[in-house]
Amino acid sequence: MKSKDPDIEINKDPDKKGIYKDQNNNHPDNHDQNRKFRIIKQEIRILGIDDAPFTPHTQGPVMVVGTVFRAGVWLDGVLRTYIQGDGTDSTEKITDMVNGSRHKDQLGVIMLDGITFGGFNVANIHQIFHETGIPVIVIMRKQPNFDRIKKALKKFGDWEKRWNNVIDAGNVHKVENNEPVYIQTCGIGVDDAEEIVRLSATRSAIPEPIRAAHIIAAGVTTGESKGSA
């Protein structure tokens, strides 16, 4: 079927929640449910999400900020939610923030600054995609060290569940640009994701929606932003 967006073609019929299913009503593999972008608009709406600075090992609330951009050029809106530091609610809170936003119907992709927020509150990108119907691109400056991540997660009683979210995020792909970044994807092909990353990285190696979310979250929390995303 074709979506309402003339520049997006979807290869499966979504249900009312935007979840793509096969004829047996089962979720297909990720590559079978990807949105296919015939043309990627120069003003594709992107929601970039990052957490605010927080005290290490806190179990208190941590602010998470989302910025809605037209590619990497024009800021259209700012969203906010709170998660528990080192908790397990980042997937739910991010999903609720997206689904409750007036910008949702215009969004082409969601970008996350990594999959851990507020310490080791690990988001499940498949669940975010399934419950919002919007493809997810995870942005990382460096190739993740999975051995180190697994070791850090083992201090939690539910570490296996958190680790499964890490594994479920899938393969890491390098995006060559002026400075390389690394991505994981859900609901979108790697080639399309790479094109969107390059299109939105207008000021630095990091896509502008992520960079702006980082700056806003830091400024609101500490009084002044500093450093890079």
Image (tube, rainbow, N blue to C red):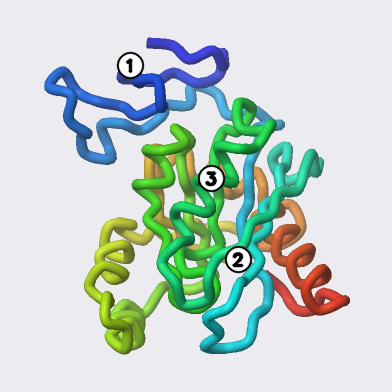
Q: Residue at x 32, y 89 (%)?
A: 155
SS type, badge 2: loop
> Residue 58 lies in what quarter of the image?
bottom right
Image x and y of residue 53, in percent: 68, 77
Instruction: Work out which residue is located at the far right of the displayed protein and give it.
Output: 223
Q: CA distance from mark 2 to mark 3?
A: 33 Å
SS type, badge 1: loop
Q: Which residue is mark 2?
A: 179
Question: Do labels 2 and 1 touch, CB within 8 Å?
Answer: no
The amino acid sitting under disc 3 is Asp
- Against 47, is 118 above or below? below
Image x and y of residue 37, in percent: 48, 26
Q: Answer with mark 3 or mark 1, whichever residue precedes in sequence.
A: 1
Report the front residue among 129 and 196: 129
Q: CA distance from mark 3 to mark 1?
A: 23 Å
The amino acid sitting under disc 1 is Asp
Q: Nearer the viewer, mark 3 or mark 1?
A: 3
Q: Which residue is mark 3?
A: 96
SS type, badge 3: helix
Label disc, if present, on residue 13 of the rendered structure: 1
